[in-house]
Amino acid sequence: MKHLCLFARRTIALRLIALGIIPLVLLSACASSTRNTESLDTKSWASVVSTAKGQTVNWYMYGGDEELNKFVNGYVADELKRDGVTLNQVKINDTAEAINKVIGEKQAGKNNGGSVDAIWSNGANFATGVQSDIWYCGWDRNLPNARFVNFDSPSIANDFGVPVAGCESAWQQANSALVYDSAKLTPKDAASMSSLLAWVKANPGHFTYPALPDFTGSMAVRTILYDTMGGPAALSGAFDEAKYNAQAIPLWKRLNDISPSLWRGGTTYPTSQTATEKLYADGEISAYMTYGPGAVGNSVSKGQFPASTREAVPEGGNIANVSFLSIPYNSPHKAAALVLANVLQDPKTQLALYKAEGAYPAIDLSKTDDATRREFAAVPNSPSVLSLADLTRNAQPELASAYISRIEKDWKTRVLQK
C-alpha cells in the first residue's frame, strides 16, 4: 500500500507542478495517507465489508439539491444498511468547508479519528486536497463495481487537469446545456452561443447567469469562452499567462458587450444557480445554462417550469465533468466510505439516480449487461430534456483548475465591477 500510495502522490505532484500548481506538501512518503490504514486491505473486499459493519460514514456534500438529498437518504442509505453501514449526510453549502475542516485537523495533528469520512469533490477542491496531502489513495480500482468504470476516459483519469491517481472514485456525470422557453426562443436562437447572445441583445432582460465563482455561473462564462476561441484546445494543459491573456481579452469584451442586455441590465447577478432557476420559473428570464439537464423534466412535470421548456447543446459542444467521492487520510471509517463508493458505482444505483435525479451515469454502460442497458434506454425521457446520446455526443473537457480560478477572479474586476 505504501508503494502504491507513494507512486500516486508522485504522479499527482509532478502533474500539479506541470499545471503551475505548487504542492504544499511534497512527497511525504505518503505517511499521512497510511496512518491508521495498515489493517485495511482494500484488495480483500470481504475484509472491507467486515470492517465496515457497524460503522457510520459521515458524507460531507452539497446539500442544496432536495431531490438528491432524498435519494441519498433514501435509496443510498438503504443500500448501505445491507452491509451494516449507517449513512450520515452532512449538508454543506460549499465543498471547501469540508476540505478546510480536514486541513485544520491535519494542522492540529489530528491524524486519526477525523470528522470527515467522505467528500463529494471535484475540480479545485480536489486539487486543494492534493496540495495539502489529505487524501487516502490507492483504492479506487479495488472496488468491486470499478469493473464498470472506464479508467481510460480522460474525465475519469483526470479531475479538471489533475490526475486522480487512485485518490477518488467517480459517481456521477454532469453535462452542461442551455435551458430555454421555446415560446420565447426558437431552436435557431439556441443553436449556438453566438445566436443566443444575439437573441439576448435583441430581447434585453431575459437571460442571466449566477455571479462567479458559482460553479454553474463559471461554466456559463467558460461556455462563452469556448465559443469565442473555437473550443478548449487553445487553453489545454498547464496554465500559461500569455495564452490566457490572448483568449481572455476577447472574452471580457464579449461579456461586457452583452452585460447591459442581461437581467437587471447586468447591474447585478443571481447569487446561485437555484436563484437563477427561480427567475426562470417565475418568468423573469427565458433561458439559462445548467449542469443538471436531466432534472429539468421534473421541474416541468411539477408545473414549476413551463411545458414549452426545451434544451439545447450549443454548436461546438457542451462542457462535461465527473463528480467524485474522496476519502480523507484521517477518516476513522474508511471501510464504510469504501462501501459507500462501491454502492454509488453499482449500475442499479446509477440507474436509480438517473431516474430520480436525471443525473447521468459515471460508469461505462458498454461494460454492463444487456438488461442494464435496456433499462437505461427505457427510462422515459421528458420532451423538455435532451437524450443522453444528444447530451454526450460532443462533450468538451474542463480546463485545468488554474485557468478556472483565474477566470473566476478576473471576472469580478473585468465584468462585475465594470
Image (cartoon, rainbow, N blue to C red):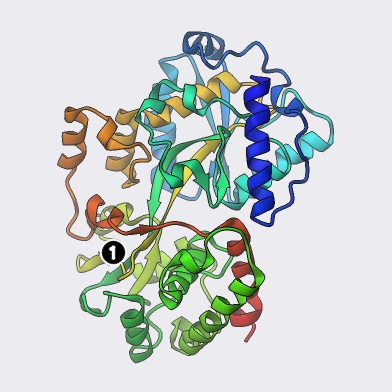
Counting from the top left corner in percent of width and height, residue 259 is at 49, 85
Q: Quadrant of residue 5?
A: top right
The C terminus appears in which quarter of the rendering?
A: bottom right
On the image, the x and y values in percent for residue 396 come to 39, 59
Residue 195 is situated, as x and y percent measured from the top left of the image, at: 31, 82
Return the residue found at the far right.
108
Which image quadrant is residue 184 in?
bottom left
Is residue 214 visible to the viewer in this orientation of the structure? Answer: yes
87, 166: nearer the viewer: 166
Circle 1 crowding by C-alpha within 10 Å: few under 14, some 14–19, many from 20: many
* Whether residue 140 is situated above or below residue 208 in the rendered picture: above
Mark 1, secondary structure of its residue = loop
Up/down of 64 relative to 72, above or below: below
Is residue 233 or residue 139 the one in the foreground? 233
Taking the spot 63% from the left edge, 62% from the top edge, the residue there is 239
Taking the image as shown, residue 180 lies to the left or right of residue 103, namely: left
- Give the residue pinned by disc 1: 305
Q: Image point 45% across, 75% down: which residue?
A: 229
For the point 22% across and 79% down, the residue is 188
What's the residue type where badge 1 is placed?
Answer: Phe
Question: What number of labels is visible?
Answer: 1
- How far across and down, in percent of the image, does residue 189 sit? 26, 80
Q: Kindly tell me whether residue 275 is visible in this rendering.
A: no
